[in-house]
Image (cartoon, coloured by chain):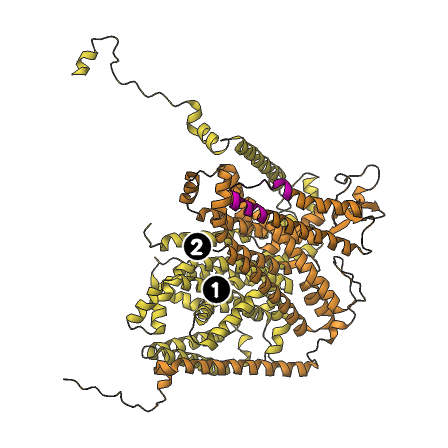
Amino acid sequence: MSDQKTNSIAFVADGTIPPSPPPAGETGPVKWLRENLFSNAVNSALTIAALLVIYVILSKTLPWLLNGVWTTNSLAECREVLQGKTGACFSVLTERWNQLLYGFKYPGDQYWRPNLALVLLLVAIAPVLFFDLPRKLLAFTAIYPFLAFWLIWGGTILAPIVALLGFAAGAFVFQTYGKSSFAIGFFGAIVAAFAVWLIGGALIPDGASDNAMLQAVPSRDLGGFMLNLMLGVTCVSLSLPLGIALALGRQSDMPLIKWICVVFIEFVRGVPLITLLFVASVMLAYFFPPESTVDLFLRVVIMITMFSAAYIAEVIRGGLAALPKGQYEAADSLGLDYPQAMRLIILPQALKISIPGIVNVAVGLFKDTTLVSVISMFDLVGMIRGPILASTEWNGVYWELLGFAALLFFVVCYGISQYSQWLERRLATDHR
Amino acid sequence: MSTLTDPPNESFRLSMLINDTRYRSLTFQVIAAVILALCIWYLGNNLIQNLRAAGLNISYNFLSDSSGYDINQRLVEYDSQSSHAKAALVGLLNTLLVAFLACITATVFGVVAGVLRLSNNWLVSKLMAFYVEIFRNIPVLIWIIIIFTIMTAVLPGPRAFRGDNATSSMLFDAFAFTNRGIYTPMPWFEHGLFASASMNWLLVIAGFVGSWFAARRINIWANQKQEATGIRPKTTALILAAWLVPFLVLMLVMGLSWEYPELKGFNFKGGIKIGGPLIALWFALSIYTGAFIAENVRAGIQAVSKGQTEAASALGLRPGKVMNLVVLPQALRVIIPPLISNFLNITKNSSLAIAVGYADITATLGGITLNQTGRAIECVLLLMLFYLTASLTISMVMNVYNASVKLKER
């Protein structure tokens, strides 16, 4: 009714007034700036200080990065090209690329082997990390360690096959007898595996590695970032089962087993990794049978695995302790025995809780693999500090090399932590 | 109708060892004990055979032999004639020194970065997130080397301070930043009460301890007064006096003066020299661990629910009191346990000193002494013993503190 009249009366508005735009200070980027950067005096001062810090950092690094030289053969040539301007000498990276990645002794025509091993690692690890992928891929994951060993070290293919057969025999025995009694199946599997290894080891002829399909590469020839990756992947994957066993042992009702685990965990956590590496390099050899030569790589793997297993055990113990007691009682009341209860009820939940902690340990461990440079293994840091900086061509190229090492580690570690956050979101089944 | 019968009087069968819960745990423990004993016997036997083959024996007598090497950075008297044990002691004190310094600065860095990361200022919080991610994801060894390289390659040598047209100059004529280390003025006493300088410093420390007790007494007295009368007497001036007066009196009586570093010949003389390796290690450990502590602090503050802050405001507390009385005590409970493990990490990571040539216990006992004497087993065992003791002590002390701030339930 009213809208009929409005047309005739001059002083009545004939429609709704269109909304006027908000004041300039309350909209768009200006509002955002006012709220987030200049809301009060202290905030403004902080913003200006932060801008100053950013400016100082960028003004130092940007010219250095952008003027970088990529194509010379020594630092002296770099300086000639730059003619006194600020600029990085990235040609050390291009010239020593292979040394940085593979160490300086790995045979140059065999680089495809570690490369292939890395690509296959991504394939093998994918079904473990992303469980939407078909479960059948796990079969490849099981074969991968032996394949990778053969690819990287070369030599006779019989050795990894015998190792694989040992595990297969163990798995078969466990499948057959494990159903009736876990303990019998478990110990039987160990016995079967060792039997296969002993017999198989005796069957491999002595000179099998001499004319093998892949040229044998001794462990001391491994180096560069490849060594860091190998140590990291091997030790994390070995220490997971060991850590779970230690955590369960620490919670055990059997005093002897409990105390063995407690003493081991507290001892290893109480000493720095470097002393354990000293043990590996100078002391462990005394504890092996005389005349046996266990190479440094294996000794280091043993010590780092023990180290990270103790930390992972503590993380998993936290996860076990966080489970409500009702879960244990429910498992008992269903009539499950200890291995069944752990496998089906307790561990899946406890491990889920422990994922962030385990990833933290894994990232820390991967970073700690650089410490092997202290016991004169030539990993990435060892290569930089040793052969490359000591060479006459590149003496004094610190920042490019250290920056490159830092970048590699950052990419890998940041990637892992992002994955763990994704996994946490994915596994969050509680309703919030 | 049922009849009750006694359970059948079974005789013991061998399978009961595994199938009967009464015996099973015993069986497993016996198996574990046997395996453990076998392992120890096997390893010990190998050790004895290897030692015999190498003509060695386990003996700690080398510790009293003269070491024959010099150590730059030392807190106690030491020269190359001193024993290996003395060298280990120098290293031990150096480890404790760098760990102590780094714990303090890492806490400062961590708290500042953690609080700033929660700031309303978008730029500042992003900058702090950047700091945390960068430092957490790159190995500490690389950081130590980078900072040591900054120390040695970027800072000027002492010769740059010399001459009329010197390219570098001392800050306030008191601090010199050179590639050999940082030189600062050294306080000393003109007419100390004791002959030796360390006794005089002990006296100063004793003065501080006295001040602390006095300040405590004042607080207790103020509390009693408040309980009795409801009015709290002003204590700020009194407490300030309790802290400052003994200190100032001591300084005046003993005649505090400063010895400034001076360029003499090719190097600076006088003052306190903080060596480059110490600074690199100290700074790298603090800034690296600071990034971890920042995350703990952030998590701790975020763990205090918003309702707590609102409830405190509703009770009429001012923002400063809300922080001090409500938020911080609760946040501390979350922050302290990871803080302890970060302090332990600093202590253990200080063993990386060996990478930059700082003479900590790993570099002296586990490095030079080990290489000179060839006593690998003894040296590494002593080294582990030291770190174990240090770790266990730190965690014990901090656990006591943790228990005192813990939520008291029922």
Q: Mark 1 belongs to which subunit?
A: A
Does the magenta portion include B193? Answer: no
Q: Quadrant of residue A322?
A: bottom left
Q: Earlier in the sequence, mark 1 or mark 2?
A: 1
Q: Is A26 placed above or below A104 here? A: above
Instruction: Check the rendered structure and report the hue given to chain A.
Output: yellow
The x and y percentages for residue B148 are 67, 51
Q: Is residue A289 visible?
A: no
> Which disc number belongs to residue A420?
2
The residue lying at 36 percent from left, 62 percent from top is A324
Instruction: Check the rendered structure and report the hue given to chain B.
Output: orange
The residue lying at 56 percent from left, 69 percent from top is A267
Of residue A340 and residue B339, the one placed in the foreground of this image is: B339
Q: Quick check: B329 left or right of A7?
A: right
Report the magenta stretch's main SS.
helix
Element carrying mark 2: helix
Q: Mark 2 belongs to which subunit?
A: A
Element carrying mark 1: helix
Q: Quick check: B46 left or right of B229?
A: right
> Which disc number belongs to residue A314?
1
Q: Is A191 placed above or below B190 here? A: below
Of badges 1 and 2, nearer the viewer stands: 1
- Range covered by the magenta-colored residues: B220-239
Amino acid type, mark 2 = Ser
Q: Residue furthest front?
A: B228
The answer to whether tags 1 and 2 share a subunit is yes
Q: Are marks 1 and 2 in contact (CB under 8 Å)?
A: no
